[in-house]
Amino acid sequence: MPPETIVCSRCGTVNGVGDQFCGSCGAFLEWEGQAPQADEPRPPVQPAEATASTAPEPAPVEVAAAPTAAPSPAAPPPAPQAGFTVCPHCGSGNPPGRTFCHKCGKLLAAPPPAAASAAAGRATTKSSSGGVPRWLLIAIIAGLLVGAIAVAAAVLFKPSPLPTDVGPSATLTPTLAIPPSITPAPASAPAASAPAASAAAPGESIQLTLTGATSSSVAADTPDVAPGNVIDGRLDTRWEEKVGAEPGEWVEITLAASRLHYLVIYNGFQLSHDSFVATKRPQNIVVTVNGGAPVGFMLADSETPQKLDVTDTPGATTVRIQIATTYPASASAYPGSPIDASAISEIRVFGSPGG
């Protein structure tokens, strides 16, 4: 009787007699399979006489080969039984438990889409990087980003030059109701001296030399917000008053006795546009010269210099600018914005020395 099973000589798995490939290791059974061993009956012993009298074998007869018929189209594989696994390659049904198809020998279970996508992604990454280590690519990208940020910061925070020509501001009108004066003890601060004034012709206005500056408060006990910054000739510094205490706060500058004609104010912190909007800016202010009659002005919310025409005052030695109202601060790229404190970058005084 023909054997009903075939044993794979590679892995020892028992397969059906019709299987062409091992269900466990996928080996081709025609090469690796063998029928299970069975006890074969011994051949009967022939009598000596019959052996001796055996007739000679007849000569072989050659038979002409019949013509081969054209192969018929292969029939579609039968529908698999319930519970059988259909091979994704040839469509044959395989009994449960098989790893390889019994007909074509290919793997029955295709790899999961996620695993295939991950493998494809790894291959793409490797080919696109050209074998360059991932950490090296990350370091190069980080270096480029740091360089771009450094260049942007250098451009953003570059101090603006002080313009030489200052025109009148149309918004400066005495529309402010004068608030009650406050007189806390001013704290002295070292002041930066402006360039020495040249001699002026009678009636001519020149930039006067300022000798010092004090204020009612400062945002911090640090040089970057000191009142002396309003006379240092730079826009990348400022006086900044105490946080949350804008109305009534003031800054006062001193000078040698002179006849005043007008003031020029650089409103807000003008290091950059981001710093300008990050802090509050004085809106309505009160100006007093030598402690005399206060005069109200409205400053524009602008980064351009603003001219304030004051009464022709002889013998002026002090000019006080007091904040009444402010423009609001806004969030920007400047660190800590919005900042609840007002700032003035620079104050210039023009007139005739000696008064």
Image (spheres, rainbow, N blue to C red):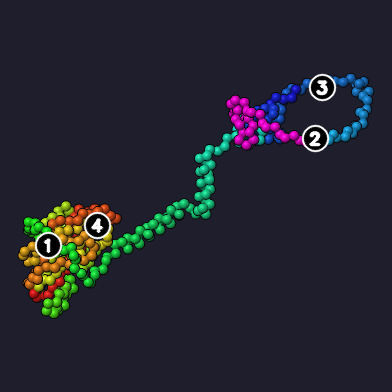
Regarding residue 11, the answer to whether it shows in the image is no
Question: Looking at the picture, which amino acid does disc 4 mark?
Answer: Val
Q: Which mark is residue 43?
A: 3
In three-dimensional space, the C-alpha distance between marks 3 and 2, rounded to whole angstroms, equals 41 Å
Furthest-left residue in view? Answer: 292
| Residue 225 drawn above or below residue 91 | below
Front-lying residue, 253 or 299: 299
State which quadrant residue 58 falls in. Answer: top right
In three-dimensional space, the C-alpha distance between marks 4 and 3, rounded to whole angstroms, equals 113 Å
Q: Secondary structure at mark 1?
A: loop
Question: Looking at the picture, which amino acid does disc 2 mark?
Answer: Ala
Work out whether mark 3 precedes mark 2 in sequence or the reverse, and give the earlier one.
3
Residue 334: image location, x then y, percent:
27, 56
Q: Which mark is residue 174?
A: 1
Q: Secondary structure at mark 4?
A: helix
Question: Looking at the picture, which amino acid does disc 1 mark?
Answer: Pro
State which quadrant residue 352 falls in. Answer: bottom left
Question: Looking at the picture, which amino acid does disc 3 mark?
Answer: Pro
In three-dimensional space, the C-alpha distance between marks 2 and 4, rounded to whole angstroms, equals 96 Å
Task: Give the label, 1 or 4, closer to the camera.
Answer: 1
* Label 2 Cα crowd, 10 Å radius (few <14 / some 14-19 / many 20+): few
Work out whether mark 1 precedes mark 2 in sequence or the reverse, and give the earlier one.
2
Front-lying residue, 295 or 29: 295
Marks 3/2 in contact by CB < 8 Å: the verdict is no
Work out whether mark 1 precedes mark 4 in sequence or the reverse, and give the earlier one.
1
Dot 2 corresponds to which residue? 69
Regarding residue 166, the answer to whether it shows in the image is yes
Range drawn in magenta: 69-97
In three-dimensional space, the C-alpha distance between marks 1 and 4, rounded to whole angstroms, equals 25 Å
Task: Give the label, 3 or 2, closer to the camera.
Answer: 2
Marks 1/4 in contact by CB < 8 Å: the verdict is no
- Magenta includes 352? no
